[in-house]
């Protein structure tokens, strides 16, 4: 039978429909991995490792061949930020996909309250076998999301990771939360590889270049190489089982290196994390993304990849599309907190474009962490301070009072030494970031405690603090645990 068209417009309409259908199908094919099965997920969580302390991020002497391989075979993120640079609240933020003051556990050593959303539980409900091994530090409730719980083995708690992969059920996809204690102090002996030498160390400009600091950093490097070693063992096991192609492996850290001006702090040395993702079935090898992402986004991304709906309480956003298109944008703003971590603190940060803005609620006090007072690098810094021998870049932890506001152009000032907040030429950028932080504060229910948790440790040269107890925490006054709003995510979308 011959089909006749009464007019050319009919033919044009049919051709248009055919073309749109073809484009839609092509887009679906591009968004979906070749293997339709949900991916296995291995999440490797380092402890106290700054973003640029890996070979694949340009460090010239730290030996990380396996993490470098992971980046070569996957996607390296160059603008990944944590929500807080503090062990337990950072982990609680990741597992819930919520800001620390919204989790109910915003301070160090506060357990996650019952009833908070746990993204591994959502994966488990969808049929995943879920495991946590190594450092936990989130309280007992968080562990209810896992089928198997282990405290880990060996000095870095990584030694049972490969046995767990071998002994897993073979009829389910799996999610592994593998959390090392490397590179947390105190340092532990290394047997797996040749130790780093003090002469190999790169001393950051805010520390003292001394033999004590160099030995301290060399041992820190060794601990990073240990987690690298066990990462390699995981990659080898995935290959041996023939499941590497559809297994997503992610590596990142909970906070910055345990040195002065790093851990707990909102500069890149404390709040920026290495983030590497490999998934051969869906991610092109050797990619680098400058897209801004937050550790808040890890859970919703895993859920998205697994085809699981995100709970309405999750404040993070999926960066699934960045895995396919590294130039894709999911954020214009990333926010972070500095709350009590041995010493009283309330700082807030927003990162946007080339700018980093910090607001300090209590500028009258020094910005301290244990690592800035104790241990070799901190002790030599204080000795030089007392002797009046510090340069301008080494003065930070001693400032009193501190700036109430700080503004940095990151590309021109990677260590954030030059505060531009008072310069009229940057008033427009300062105003924009102030407004973004104000909006985030209101929408997420952040508060400055009126009866804050006091210092637990004695500050040098100051009276011994009162008997320690956790008191009012950020967000308590607004019942922030019940708030699910995200604050601004994209500048064009008040999400």
Image (cartoon, rainbow, N blue to C red):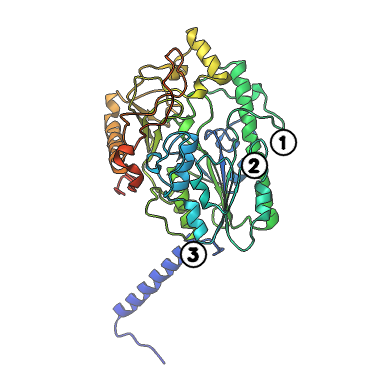
Task: Identify the residue at horizontal 65%, vertical 31% (top origin).
Answer: 222
- Residue furthest bottom in the image: 1
Residue denoted by label 1: 192
Q: For mark 3, does the 10 Å Cα neighbourhood hold few (<14), some (14 to 19), or many (20 or more) residues? A: few
Q: CA distance from mark 3 to mark 1?
A: 43 Å
Judge depth for marks 3 and 1 and give the one in front. 1
Disc 3 + disc 2, Cβ < 8 Å = no
Q: Earlier in the sequence, mark 3 or mark 1?
A: 3
Q: Earlier in the sequence, mark 1 or mark 2?
A: 2
Judge depth for marks 1 and 2 and give the one in front. 2
**Location of the N terminus (image quadrant):** bottom left
Q: For mark 1, does the 10 Å Cα neighbourhood hold few (<14), some (14 to 19), or many (20 or more) residues? A: few
Quadrant of the rendered structure where residue 226 is?
top right
Helix, strand or loop at label 2? It is: loop
Helix, strand or loop at label 3? It is: helix
Picture coordinates of residue 21, whole percent (x, y) = 40, 71
Task: Identify the residue at horizontal 54%, vertical 33% (top origin).
Answer: 48
Give the left or right position of residue 346, taking residue 221 as reference: left
Task: Name the residue nearer the viewer: 27 or 132.
Answer: 132
Picture coordinates of residue 109, whole percent (x, y) = 48, 35
* Residue 17 higher or lower than 377, as above or below: below
Give the left or right position of residue 390, taking residue 172 as reference: left
Q: For mark 2, does the 10 Å Cα neighbourhood hold few (<14), some (14 to 19), or many (20 or more) residues? A: many
Helix, strand or loop at label 1? It is: loop
Residue denoted by label 3: 29
Q: Earlier in the sequence, mark 3 or mark 2?
A: 3
* Residue 406 higher or lower than 482, as above or below: above
Residue denoted by label 2: 158
């Amino acid at each position: 039978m011959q089909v006749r068209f009464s007019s050319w417009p009919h033919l044009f309409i049919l051709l248009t429909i055919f073309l749109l259908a073809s484009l839609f199908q092509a887009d679906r094919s591009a968004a979906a991995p070749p293997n339709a099965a949900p991916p296995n997920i291995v999440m490797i969580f380092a402890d106290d490792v700054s973003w640029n302390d890996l070979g694949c991020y340009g460090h010239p002497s730290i030996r990380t061949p396996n993490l470098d391989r992971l980046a070569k075979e996957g996607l390296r993120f160059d603008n990944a930020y944590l929500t807080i640079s503090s062990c337990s609240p950072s982990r609680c933020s990741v597992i819930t996909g919520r800001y620390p003051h919204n989790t109910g556990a915003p301070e160090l050593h506060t357990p996650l309250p019952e009833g908070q959303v746990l993204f591994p539980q959502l994966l488990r409900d969808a049929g995943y076998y879920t495991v946590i091994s190594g450092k936990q530090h989130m309280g007992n409730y968080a562990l209810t999301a896992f089928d198997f719980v282990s405290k880990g083995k060996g000095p870095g708690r990584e030694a049972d990771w490969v046995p767990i992969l071998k002994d897993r059920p073979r009829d389910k996809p799996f999610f592994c939360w593998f959390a090392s204690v490397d590179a947390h102090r105190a340092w532990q002996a290394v047997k797996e590889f040749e130790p780093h030498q003090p002469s190999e160390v790169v001393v950051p400009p805010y520390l003292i270049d001394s033999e004590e600091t160099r030995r301290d950093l060399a041992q820190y490097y060794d601990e990073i190489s240990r987690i690298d070693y066990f990462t390699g063992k995981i990659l080898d096991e995935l290959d041996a089982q023939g499941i590497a192609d559809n297994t997503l492996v992610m590596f990142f850290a909970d906070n910055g290196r345990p040195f002065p001006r790093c851990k707990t702090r909102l500069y890149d040395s404390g709040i920026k994390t290495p983030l590497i993702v490999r998934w051969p079935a869906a991610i092109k090898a050797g990619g680098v993304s400058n897209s801004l992402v937050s550790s808040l986004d890890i859970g919703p991304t895993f859920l998205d990849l697994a085809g699981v709906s995100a709970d309405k309480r999750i404040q993070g956003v999926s960066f699934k599309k960045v895995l396919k298109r590294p130039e894709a944008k999911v954020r214009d703003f990333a926010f972070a907190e500095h709350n009590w971590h041995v010493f009283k603190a309330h700082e807030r940060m927003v990162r946007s474009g080339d700018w980093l803005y910090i607001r300090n609620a209590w500028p009258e006090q020094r910005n301290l962490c244990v690592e800035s007072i104790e241990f070799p690098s901190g002790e030599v810094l204080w000795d030089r301070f007392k002797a009046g021998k510090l340069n301008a870049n080494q003065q930070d932890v001693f400032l009193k009072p501190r700036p109430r506001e700080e503004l940095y152009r990151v590309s021109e000032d990677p260590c954030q030494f030059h505060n531009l907040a008072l310069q009229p030429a940057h008033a427009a950028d300062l105003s924009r970031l102030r407004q973004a932080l104000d909006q985030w504060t209101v929408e997420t229910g952040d508060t400055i405690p009126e009866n804050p948790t006091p210092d637990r440790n004695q500050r040098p040269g100051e009276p011994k603090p009162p008997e320690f107890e956790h008191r009012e925490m950020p967000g308590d006054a607004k019942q922030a645990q019940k708030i699910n709003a995200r604050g601004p995510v994209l500048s064009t979308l008040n999400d």
